[in-house]
Image (cartoon, rainbow, N blue to C red):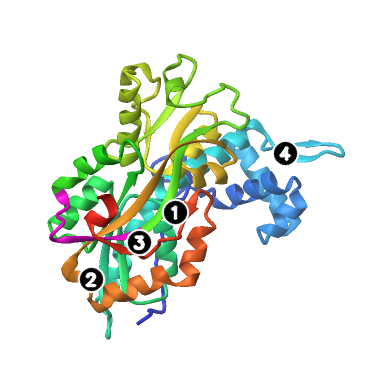
């Protein structure tokens, strides 16, 4: 059954002067600034935002008065560009969205499923706990109007597998680098994976590596360069598999973590890492290639990772799980994942035992 509504949560900015002030929403001016940044002129930006030219100018002038500084720089015959203040404002908004959207999507999914269970003829629901990734995000989009219902919680791979082991979820997402670090990573996961009890659903193969600013002005070539004193690094959060992979690579090179400037600075998503670097707050970070591409960053490959959903064998033949597999194996979803930069969907939806996947 498909409900007649979808719940979505979005971050928002308000400017307030005191505790009794309800504040002024910034969404309209932020959208307008983003359109000006993309198109280079106000008239086109107003059309893109569905605003009249007069109203758009009014919005800009209003917030220039609020902030006390210009938002635009207009040069004769060269179009319009954002002032340094407006650029910083826009990048702050992009970082906030990159940080918060996965959390808000998870909360929206939880609320959606809670409400749907109260509706008549509510269908089966599956609980997915997984680390954030573009193929996971796409799966939620493809299932938004279909059954079974899929309730998402973004968790680190360790948290997701522990949830599966304790019966708190039906599918647990985790990723494993191919090559020399595969066995080490699997030893870490082994405490929650039982070959007699669990199966794996192959989601995708994805490229993971370093993000650097366009043109790579610091000449970063690999993990060893993170120890240089002039390189600022931004990491993934404690407990994430990506952070664990960086640690393994540094240990292989006998580089103490304390030599990496910014190692303790962390972001919760690949997009947030990319936004952090693109806004000039760091020189390098780590994540999947898709995020680097979307923020116009250079990408230095480090590893290919296989992303799996672990499930209990007893759940495989359930109607809800079979319906989910049908969507994952369908042309629409596989084609979408396959066109993500840095993703390979060749084996998406394949069922494997732990032995078959890892020998």
Q: Is residue 91 left or right of residue 183?
A: right
Question: Which sits in the foreground, 277 or 19?
Answer: 277
* Neighbour tally class for label 3: few under 14, some 14-19, many 20 plus, Cα within 10 Å: many
Q: Which label is found at residue 247?
A: none
Q: Is residue 134 magenta?
A: no
Q: Which label is found at residue 81?
A: 4
Q: Disc 3 on helix, strand or loop?
A: helix
Q: Work out whether 275 lies above or below 168.
A: above
* Neighbour tally class for label 4: few under 14, some 14-19, many 20 plus, Cα within 10 Å: many
Residue 80 x %, y %: 76, 41
Q: Disc 1 on helix, strand or loop?
A: helix
How far is mark 2 from mark 4, CA to CA?
A: 55 Å
Q: Which residues are magenta?
A: 192-202
Q: Is residue 200 magenta?
A: yes
Residue 179 x %, y %: 35, 39
Looking at the rendered image, the disc whose residue lies closer to the viewer, 1 or 3, is 1
For the N terminus, which image quadrant? bottom left
The residue where tag 3 is placed is: 108
Q: Disc 4 on helix, strand or loop?
A: strand
The residue where tag 1 is placed is: 134
**Residue that appears at 43% across and 26% down:** 223
The residue where tag 2 is placed is: 316
Q: Is residue 117 left or right of residue 30?
A: left
Residue 224 x %, y %: 43, 21
First in sequence: mark 1 vs mark 3? 3
Name of the residue lying farthest toward the bottom = 121
Q: Disc 2 on helix, strand or loop?
A: loop
């Amino acid at each position: 059954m498909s409900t007649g509504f979808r719940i979505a949560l979005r971050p928002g900015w308000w400017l307030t002067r005191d505790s009794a002030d309800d504040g002024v929403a910034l969404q309209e001016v932020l959208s307008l600034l983003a359109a000006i940044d993309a198109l280079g002129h106000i008239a086109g930006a107003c059309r893109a935002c569905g605003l009249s030219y007069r109203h758009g100018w009014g919005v800009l002038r209003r917030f220039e008065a609020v902030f006390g500084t210009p938002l635009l720089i207009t040069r004769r015959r060269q179009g319009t560009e954002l002032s340094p203040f407006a650029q910083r404002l826009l990048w702050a908004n992009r970082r906030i969205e990159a940080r918060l959207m996965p959390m808000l999507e998870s909360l929206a999914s939880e609320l959606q499923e809670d409400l749907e269970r109260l509706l008549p003829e509510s269908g089966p629901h599956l609980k997915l706990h997984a680390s954030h990734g573009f193929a996971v995000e796409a799966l939620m989009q493809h299932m938004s109007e279909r059954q079974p219902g899929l309730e998402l919680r973004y968790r680190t791979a360790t948290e997701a597998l522990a949830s599966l082991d304790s019966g708190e979820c039906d599918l647990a997402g985790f990723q494993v680098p191919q090559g020399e670090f595969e066995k080490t990573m699997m030893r870490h996961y082994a405490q929650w994976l039982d070959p007699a009890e669990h199966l794996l659903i192959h989601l995708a193969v994805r490229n993971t590596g370093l993000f650097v600013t366009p043109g790579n002005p610091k000449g970063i070539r690999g993990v060893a360069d993170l120890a240089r004193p002039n390189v600022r690094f931004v990491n993934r959060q404690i407990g994430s598999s990506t952070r664990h992979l960086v640690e393994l690579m540094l240990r292989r090179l006998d580089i103490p973590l304390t030599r990496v400037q910014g190692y303790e600075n962390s972001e919760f998503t690949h997009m947030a890492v990319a936004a952090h670097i693109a806004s000039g707050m760091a020189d390098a970070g780590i994540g999947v290639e898709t995020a680097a591409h979307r923020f116009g960053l250079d990408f230095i490959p480090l590893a290919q990772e296989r992303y799996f959903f672990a499930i209990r064998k007893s759940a495989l033949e359930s109607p809800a799980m079979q319906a989910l597999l049908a969507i994952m194996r369908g042309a629409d979803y596989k084609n979408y994942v396959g066109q993500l930069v840095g993703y390979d969907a060749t084996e998406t939806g394949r069922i494997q035992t732990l032995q078959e996947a890892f020998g």
